Image (tube, helix red, strand yellow):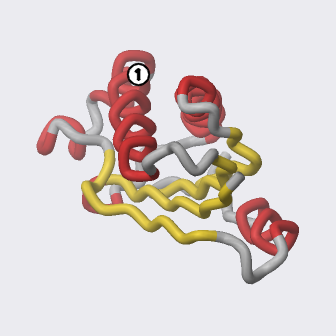
Amino acid sequence: MLHAHLIFITKYRGKVFNDASLQRLESIFKEVGEAFEVELTEFNGECDHVHLLVNYPPKVQLSKLINSLKGVSSRKLKQEFVDLREHWICKKSGSLWSPSYFAGSVGGAPLSVLKQYIEQQDRPL
């Protein structure tokens, strides 16, 4: 298994997430991951970005996984959270996520250090 640290930011760094939307986002990411045989081992976020630590098999193309994670989560969150759908970012651009992302392979630092970093994100209430 390979390990990657992923970071997705919202379009224009809009502050759109609260605890409820982050909880739902985590469950959506887990559902999408199962379809790719990917394990979401750590998740957290702030009001304008999220961190994921994933374990994935070598046969998975990381770019396809990321495209699916961002596409499915954007669609489902906008369907389920009216306040998010009505936020100026989604109205203006139609997109929840910025097209960019960070993907770093994990191996040099112990996974426990990265897990601790993700856990310590300043999650909104």
- In this rendering, the answer to whether 84 lies above or below 64 is above
Q: Where residue 121 sits in the image (x, y, percent)?
A: 69, 64
- In this rendering, the answer to whether 115 lies above or below 21 is below
- Badge 1 amino acid: Lys
Query: In the drawing, does residue 63 fall left or right of residue 120?
Result: left
For the point 41% across and 22% down, which residue is it?
76
Question: Of helix, strand and loop, which one carries label 1?
Answer: helix
Q: Which residue is mark 1?
A: 76
For the point 77% across and 80% down, which residue is it?
109
- In this rendering, the answer to whether 10 lies above or below 75 is below
Q: Residue furthest left?
A: 92
Q: Where residue 124 sits in the image (x, y, percent)?
A: 63, 51
Query: In the drawing, does residue 34 fall left or right of residue 89?
Result: right
Q: Which quadrant of the view contains residue 120?
A: bottom right
Label 1, residues with CA under 10 Å away: few <14, some 14-19, many ≥20: few
Q: Which quadrant of the view contains residue 95?
A: top left
Q: Where residue 88 sits in the image (x, y, percent)?
A: 22, 42
Q: Where residue 94 sits in the image (x, y, percent)?
A: 17, 36
For the point 51% across and 54% down, which residue is it?
47
Depth check, front residue: 120 or 3: 3
Query: In the drawing, does residue 65 fall left or right of residue 40?
Result: left
